[in-house]
């Protein structure tokens, strides 16, 4: 074996390792084709925008795009995106602040780009841009998707069930007030969140939506608590039926 051929395999191996160590930058969107540095400056804590962490009143339409290749991703979690909405209610810029996986980040960004928002004067009575923290959950679950059409057919004031669903096993390990752990404890951020989700007729939770949140891993922690709980499904006329549930969680520091 010549000396040249002797070093081919080690060099190829090193190249593969280096390629695997490449760190991609944060995913962002700009309506004006701004640079990533310019977009990041828009979300600086000192920027002159009004930050709205509780965003239900600001969104007119947002359909979370589905994930079709879970086998390739093998990771779950909540993607956090900061979105800057202009005076007309248009998406001016968006930046992934809490990454889960490149594919999930991209799907979440497309979800935000296709959403519709209200102008600031319709939400907070000001004539300027505002920032929203959008928390978009992605979890593979056993929820029976065929029952979604049943849930969507309910009228606004129609009762979904006679007997509400209830946790059977595991909820005692998922208190509504949860202490922070890890890096989030250093940020001193606290508050309430609300998770809206479906429970199918077999008691499987799924189709999660963060209807109120603030990031730092709080939503992921709450959803994991819901998922590890065994649920007794709701019933109507004595038969198990799917339903939609909203549960509040409080994240506070205990001194």
Image: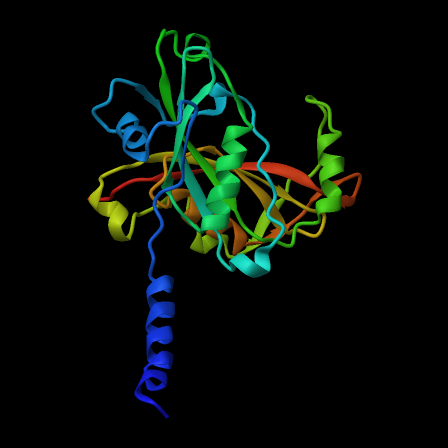
Residue drawn at 51 percent across, 49 percent down = 226
Query: How many numbered circles does the render carry?
Result: 0
Residue 236 in sight from this viewpoint: yes
Q: Quadrant of residue 150?
A: top right
Position of residue 126 measured from the top left corner of the image (x, y, whole percent): 36, 7
Which sits in the foreground, 16 or 66?
A: 16
Position of residue 7 measured from the top left corner of the image (x, y, whole percent): 32, 82
Which sits in the foreground, 60 or 107?
A: 107
Left-right relation of 218 to 111: left
Q: Quadrant of residue 15?
A: bottom left
Q: Quadrant of the C terminus?
A: top left
Q: Quadrant of residue 115?
A: top right
Residue drawn at 33 percent across, 62 percent down = 21
Residue drawn at 39 percent across, 7 percent down = 125
Q: Quadrant of the N terminus?
A: bottom left
Residue 161 in sight from this viewpoint: no
């Amino acid at each position: 074996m010549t000396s040249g051929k002797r070093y081919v395999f080690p060099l190829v191996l090193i190249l593969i390792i280096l390629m695997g160590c490449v760190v991609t930058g944060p995913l962002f969107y700009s309506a004006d084709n701004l640079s990533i540095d310019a977009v990041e400056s828009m979300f600086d804590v000192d920027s002159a925008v009004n930050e709205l962490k509780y965003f239900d009143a600001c969104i007119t339409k947002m359909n979370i795009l589905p994930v079709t290749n879970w086998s390739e991703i093998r990771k779950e979690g909540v993607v956090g995106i900061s979105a800057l909405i202009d005076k007309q209610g248009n998406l001016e810029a968006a930046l992934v602040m809490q990454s889960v996986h490149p594919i999930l980040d991209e799907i979440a960004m497309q979800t935000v780009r296709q959403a519709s928002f209200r102008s600031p004067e319709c939400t907070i009575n000001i004539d300027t841009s505002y920032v929203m923290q959008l928390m978009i959950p992605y979890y593979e679950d056993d929820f029976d998707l065929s029952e979604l059409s049943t849930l969507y057919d309910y009228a606004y004031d129609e009762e979904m069930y006679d007997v509400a669903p209830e946790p059977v096993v595991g909820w005692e390990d998922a208190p509504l007030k949860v202490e922070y752990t890890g890096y989030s404890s250093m940020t001193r951020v606290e508050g309430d969140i609300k998770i809206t989700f479906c429970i199918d007729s077999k008691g499987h939770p799924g189709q999660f939506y963060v209807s109120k949140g603030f990031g730092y891993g709080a939503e992921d922690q709450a959803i994991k608590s819901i998922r590890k709980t065994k649920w007794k499904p709701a019933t109507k006329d004595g038969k198990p039926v799917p339903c939609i549930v909203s549960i509040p969680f409080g994240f506070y520091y205990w001194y």
